[in-house]
Image: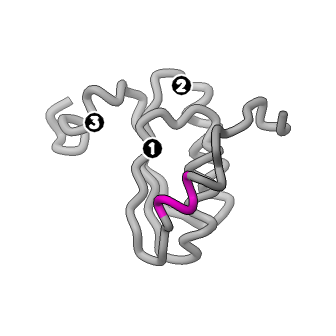
Amino acid sequence: MTNSGHIPVLPSEVARLLNPSEGDVIVDLTAGRGGHGKQLASLALENVTVILFDLDRENLDYAAEQVKMVGAKVHAYHASFITAAWVREGRR
């Protein structure tokens, strides 16, 4: 377990399959403690935006701070992944 209180599932496999790069927009619909978002943002290196969704406000805030630590621009939404399309279109 990491000091974030969570171990991301299959981090190497996720990184290899998604292969993030500079300028990407990464969407994590179940942000949790931000493990995958932070990892993917750090691999993308520069000019990356990470969009986070989670129903747990405390976890979402923690995740947003973790992702910001690697220099990514973050948009965090306290909402269910089911509403992601509506939230991004401003129809929340």
Q: Within the image, what quadrant is residue 88 found in? A: top left
Q: Amino acid at mark 2?
A: Arg
Q: Main secondary structure of the magenta part?
A: helix
Label 1 vs label 2: CA separation? 15 Å
Q: CA distance from mark 3 to mark 1?
A: 10 Å
Point out which mark residue 57 bears: 2
The earlier-in-sequence mark between 1 and 2 is 1
State the mark number for residue 92.
none
Quarter of the image holding residue 28? Answer: top left
> Which residue is pictured at 84% across the width and 33% down the height?
1
Q: Which residue is mark 1?
A: 28
- Residue type at tag 1: Asp
| Disc 1 residue crowd, few under 14, some 14–19, many 20+, Cα 10 Å | some
**Residue closer to the observer: 58 or 22:** 22
* Callout in the foreground (2, 3): 3
User: Which residue, given by chain and number where applicable, does mark 3 sit on?
Assistant: 84
Name the secondary structure under disc 1: strand
Residue 21 vertical position relative to residue 65 in the rendered view, above or below: below
Disc 2/disc 3 C-alpha distance (Å):
16 Å
Question: From the image, which quarter does the C terminus lie in?
Answer: top left
- Which numbered mark, 1 or 2, is in the foreground of this view? 1
What percent of the width, then of the height, locates residue 3? 85, 37
Give the image's coloring scheme.
one colour
N-terminal-most mark, 3 or 1 = 1
Region rendered in magenta: 14-18
Identify the secondary structure beneath mark 2: helix
Q: Is residue 41 above or below residue 78?
A: below
Q: Quadrant of residue 42?
A: bottom right
Left or right: residue 71 compared with residue 89: right
